[in-house]
Amino acid sequence: MSVTLYLAGGAGSEPFQNSVTDLQATANFEEAVVNAGTWIFYKFKDFNDRTDNQESWIKILTPSQQKVDITNFNGSVYLLEQQTEGIVLFEHYYYGGKRKVPL
């Protein structure tokens, strides 16, 4: 599972293989290309760990060769690992919160 995030202004890129709770602490990313896996991008750090989440605060990306604009969704990113069975429960609406329980 991997995603490549591109820095503002095309100044470079950085690959990620795991979830990141605070992307802005790493850099200001503007675009993403998902190589493998399903990734949820959040507007705020800590996976939108809020009770007032809105659907417009997330962006779900699957594998593609095209760069996708994530300018408004570079707070955090969660890797939703591919599973053949089961579900994942999130703490808040719209995939928010730090506690996730695979069932």
Image: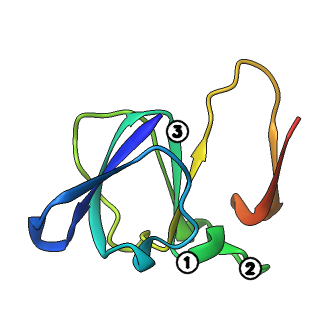
Q: Taking 91 as reference, is 34 left or right?
A: left
Distance CA(mark 2)–CA(mark 3): 22 Å
| Tag count | 3
Mark 3, residue position = 38
User: Residue 81's x, y, as percent?
Assistant: 62, 35
Q: Taking 41 as reference, is 64 left or right?
A: left
* Observer-nearest of 42 and 45: 45
Which of the labelled discs sits on residue 44, or is there none? Answer: 1
Q: Taking 69 as reference, is 36 left or right?
A: right
Q: CB atoms at circles 2 and 1 under 8 Å apart? A: yes
Which is nearer the N-term, disc 3 or disc 1? 3
For the point 82% across and 27% down, which residue is it? 86
Distance CA(mark 2)–CA(mark 1): 9 Å
Say which amino acid is labelled 1: Phe
User: Residue 84's x, y, as percent?
Assistant: 71, 18
Which of the labelled discs sits on residue 50, or is there none? Answer: 2
State the image quarter where residue 54 is shown: bottom right
Dot 2 falls on a residue whose secondary structure is loop
For the point 70% across and 58% down, which residue is it? 95
User: Residue 60's x, y, as percent?
Assistant: 50, 50
Work out whether 37 lies above or below 96. above
Q: Is residue 93 visible?
A: no
> Badge 1: how crowded within 10 Å, few (<14), some, or many (20+)?
many
Which is nearer the N-term, disc 2 or disc 3? 3
